[in-house]
Amino acid sequence: MTDLLPTARSGPAPLIKGAPAEDTARRAGPAVVRGTRRRLGPGRTVPFGRLIGPVLLVALWWAASASGHLDPRILSGPGSVLSTAADLVATGRLQDNVLISLQRAGLGLLFGATAGVVLAVTAGLSRSGEYLLDGPLQIKRAIPSLAMLPLLILWLGIGEQMKVTVIALGVAVNMYINTYASLTSIDSRYVELAEGLDLGRAQFLRKVVVPGSLPGFFVGLRLGVTSSWLGLIVVEQINSTSGIGYMMFQAQQYAQSDVIIVGLVAYGIFGFASDAGVRVIERKVLSWRRTLAG
């Protein structure tokens, strides 16, 4: 990047009295001839632009189904899925299962995010906390939460407590890793400045730690939201009697692919909407940052 500085500082070549216009333009370089600067960023954001991909995917699915290229025995078409969803809503079956799934995912996200942030702050602001916590959590990071299912079932049974615990474990690890990395990457000069200004512990946390860790916190939260839905899909198919996963498992027994697709679409909608909600909050809280995301 340093080799760009002399060119940027020099600016356009000066006009020489009596020199031909073409010669002056040639000396000035291509930027002056065109009169515009080359754009290197991703460009301007488009409102609701993230919906373009899902809409195109649904349109492709619909076209493949309508043209007969998609066997309904393998994958039901959008029309059949919408009809099935309407029937499930009319009987109240879909709403009941969705509410139970949302409760499980919400509790797992709440407990996991809280635990992950507390552990990250403890390890990031204290050497003794780092030595005690970071090693075990890095080991847990290498062990998928789903691999602990047999042990958790042995300890907690097959009830709601086990399901929420599996979801919370996945969320907590994501929150810890990203928040801890953001905390430990705060420039030490800010810490020295806070010490030079004789800031108290509370002021240091509010003015240095919180702003410095928020970017990593939101990355961890987005990954945690996704992790909560991934964990939910698995635990709801293990001796469950309710939830979207249970509804899909029952549909598998009777080869009802349209019901399975309804469940997958529900998971996808909730995952996309929750991630979009976190993005909106992140954009408002971190409005002081200027990034390529816009």
Image: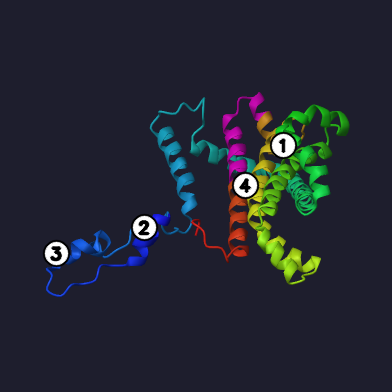
Residue type, label 1: Arg
In the picture of the structure, the residue carrying the numbered disc 1 is: 141
Please tell me which residue is depicted at 71% across the width and 61% down the height of the picture.
Answer: 209
Are circles 4 and 1 on residues that touch, CB within 8 Å?
no
Tell me, for residue 22, which label it has, or none.
3
Could you say whether the residue bearing mark 4 is in a helix, strand or loop? Answer: helix
Q: Secondary structure at mark 3?
A: helix
Q: Nearer the viewer, mark 4 or mark 1?
A: 1
Residue sitting nearer the eye, 243 or 277? 277
Measured Cα–Cα span from mark 1 to mark 2: 40 Å
Three-letter code for the amino acid on which mark 3 is drawn:
Glu
Q: How many marks?
A: 4
Q: Which residue is mark 2?
A: 39
For label 4, count other residues whose C-alpha is less than 10 Å away and answer few (under 14), some (14-19) or many (20+): some
Q: Using residue 74 as the reference point, say whether residue 256 is left or right of it.
A: right
Q: Measure how far apart labels 2 and 3 are at the Cα level.
A: 25 Å
Residue at image x 83%, y 36%? 159
Q: Earlier in the sequence, mark 1 or mark 2?
A: 2
Q: Are marks 1 and 2 in contact (CB under 8 Å)?
A: no
- Residue 142 vertical position relative to residue 271 in the rendered view, above or below: above
